Image (cartoon, rainbow, N blue to C red):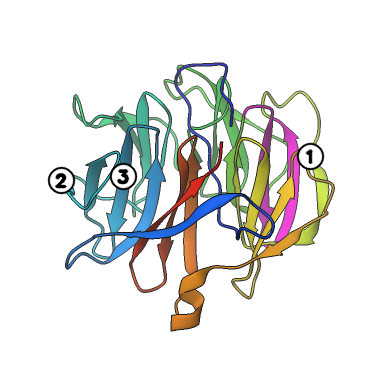
Amino acid sequence: MMLTFICVISVLACTTSSVYASHGWKKISVGALNMDTIAASVNYLWTGSADNKIYRCAQPCTGNWKYVAGNLRQTDASGCEIWTTTKINGIWKRGVDGSGSWVKVSGTGLHVSASGNGYMWHVSTDHCSYSCKKPCSGKWTKMDTCALKQLDAGEEYVYAVNQTNHVLSRPVDGSRPWRVVPGLMRYVTVGSREIYGLDPDNKIYRCDLPCIGEWEKIEFDACDEGDFLKQMEATLNGIFAVTDSGLVYHYETAY
């Protein structure tokens, strides 16, 4: 997103030149590593491998991954911090550049989003959504919808996916109730101008913000090789994605 605050990232997915201006997908070397998740800020990439190890790479990343002690289930970055949930549902954070050490934040989380404008969001082990005003020290406010499995926050709105793959949205400050966005997605991620989603069949779609359900199908080149996108995220300098086979791709955007 075109950000008006300092500590934030955006989270996008993928598209093709027919619906989204870009310079194409480029593979980022991971060596023998098998990547499972990815988070991105303008200056750093963070990944979790299939064996729950954490790696960091300075942008532009050419494959020089640095091991970072710790373990994770899911991670998300702002311009200042990297946040992670662990296999035992803990929530931790540290400097996005790897500085300092991991700091435990109160709460239990399945999925955390650090990219919201002024607010953190997470889905807890009760599958309910919680928000926390930045800088967040763990004073979470429970919101009014549960049965969620994943969410992502942007500059103006937070989007969530529930257990039946319905997409929901509300203002990032939580000032209005959730609304239903037409379309079924298993994963959503918010960019500066679009929201991107993976549907239950792993097909990729985009929708102009704030999105009223006018999804456009887009393609991912590696699908021709039998691979598909597992998870994706973006910053102002492009889209980053992890595939089912553990590869990492970058999709440079035109803005």
Q: Residues within 10 Å of mark 1 (few under 14, many from 20)?
A: some
Q: Is residue 189 above or below residue 18?
A: above
Please state the total of marks drawn on the protein image: 3
Q: Earlier in the sequence, mark 3 or mark 2?
A: 3
Q: Residues within 10 Å of mark 3 (few under 14, many from 20)?
A: many
- State left or right for residue 110 relative to residue 150: left
Residue 33 location, quadrant: bottom left
Q: Is residue 93 above or below residue 225?
A: above
Q: Are marks 3 and 1 in contact (CB under 8 Å)?
A: no
Residue at image location 66% in from the left, 67% down from the top: 199
- Which residue in the protein does label 2 denote? 66
- State left or right for residue 205 relative to residue 91: right
Say which amino acid is labelled 1.
Answer: Trp
- State left or right for residue 146 relative to residue 97: right
Mark 1, mark 2: which one is toward the viewer? 2
Q: Earlier in the sequence, mark 1 or mark 2?
A: 2
Q: Are marks 3 and 2 in contact (CB under 8 Å)?
A: no
Residue 52 location, quadrant: bottom left
Q: CA distance from mark 3 to mark 2?
A: 9 Å
Say which amino acid is labelled 3.
Answer: Trp
Q: Is residue 172 above or below residue 13?
A: above
- Which residue in the protein does label 3 denote? 46
Segment colored magenta: 155-171
Circle 1: element type: loop
Residue 77 lies, in percent from the top left, at 41, 35
Quarter of the picture holding the N terminus? top right
Say which amino acid is labelled 2.
Answer: Lys
Q: Earlier in the sequence, mark 3 or mark 1?
A: 3
Residue 96 lies, in percent from the top left, at 31, 30
Residue at image location 36% in from the left, 74% down from the top: 245
Residue 158, magenta (yes or no):
yes
- Which residue in the protein does label 1 denote? 178
